[in-house]
Amino acid sequence: MKYFDYLTQEQETSLFYSPPVTFNHRTSKELLAYAVGAALYMPATRASVAEDIVKLRGAGLVTVIIDLEDAIGDGEVCFAEESVFRHLSFLSAYTENEPEPENGLPLIFIRVRSPEQLQQLIFRLGSLITMLTGFVFPKFSAENGVDFFEAIADYNSSRSYSAPVLYGMPILESASIIYRESRLDSLLAIRNLLGDYRDYVLNVRIGATDFSSLFGLRRSPDISIYDLTPIRDCMADIINVFGRVEEGYVISGPVWEYFGNKGRVV
């Protein structure tokens, strides 16, 4: 995958055995699932989200997740949703002046709070939804997962032929998954659910921050998440259930707990 647009053709030839290929949100799922790469989380309430996306794309930003969940307060939800419309409208206008509009932006996702919010956003976004690669589903479980993916499936079944497929990325981060006594049953139930919507599952993501908080664990940027035994053991089971060769999903690494000026990276 071509992550570094600023390399010249000569540099690419000297660095890579096989030249990297370009991709965008219309690329086939088989390639796109791997192309997501590192994702930068940005709170939807940040005023400069759209401008930052344009600027950082030139520096190598591949995927951005506009956050409507943990990064904003409960009293900011309405303002955050309206901000999403402003950000996407700005980006839509920006691409109109791009010679290659499909390749002018990173992959864009929105992390929603609930299936109900997802359904409302899909309806309200209208044509702006074609700017998105998909949505991220926090605290995903067998109980709420059907509602999340039914909303995605309903949209895809009615979208126009020219519109890109909309994907979902569940985050595994709930207590029933990290607690040993309920883990296997929870993981198997989620795997069975995802099998019904496999065409729309782009990544399976791991919410190590929420896992850590259930044990009161914190770590500095110098400590690997794999050094925290409860999290490491849980991640191993997630890989065992979801990462098998015969039916494996692409599994993302957990969030890196670094808070800089723009957001956080996973």
Image (cartoon, grey):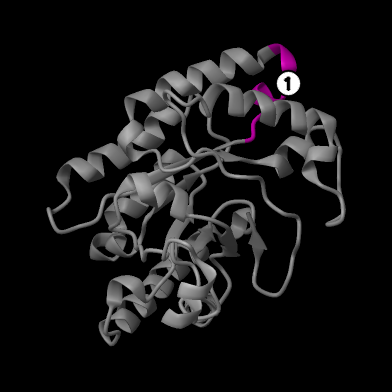
Q: Nearer the viewer, residue 82 or 104?
A: 104
Residue span colored magenta: 173-181
**In what quadrant of the picture does the C terminus appear?**
bottom right
21 over 136 or under it: above or below = below
Q: Is residue 143 left or right of residue 213?
A: left
Q: Position of residue 37 (x, y in %)?
A: 53, 55
Note whether residue 117 is visible. Answer: yes
Q: Position of residue 56 (x, y in %)?
A: 54, 78
210 part of magenta stretch: no
**In what quadrant of the picture does the N terminus appear?**
bottom left
Q: Is residue 38 left or right of residue 98?
A: right
Q: Is residue 59 left or right of residue 130?
A: right
According to the picture, the residue beneath numbered tag 1 turns out to be: 179
Which quadrant would residue 197 be assigned to in this image? Answer: top left
Point 65% across, 72% down: residue: 262
Which quadrant would residue 88 be assigned to in this image? Answer: bottom left
Q: Position of residue 127 (x, y in %)?
A: 23, 64
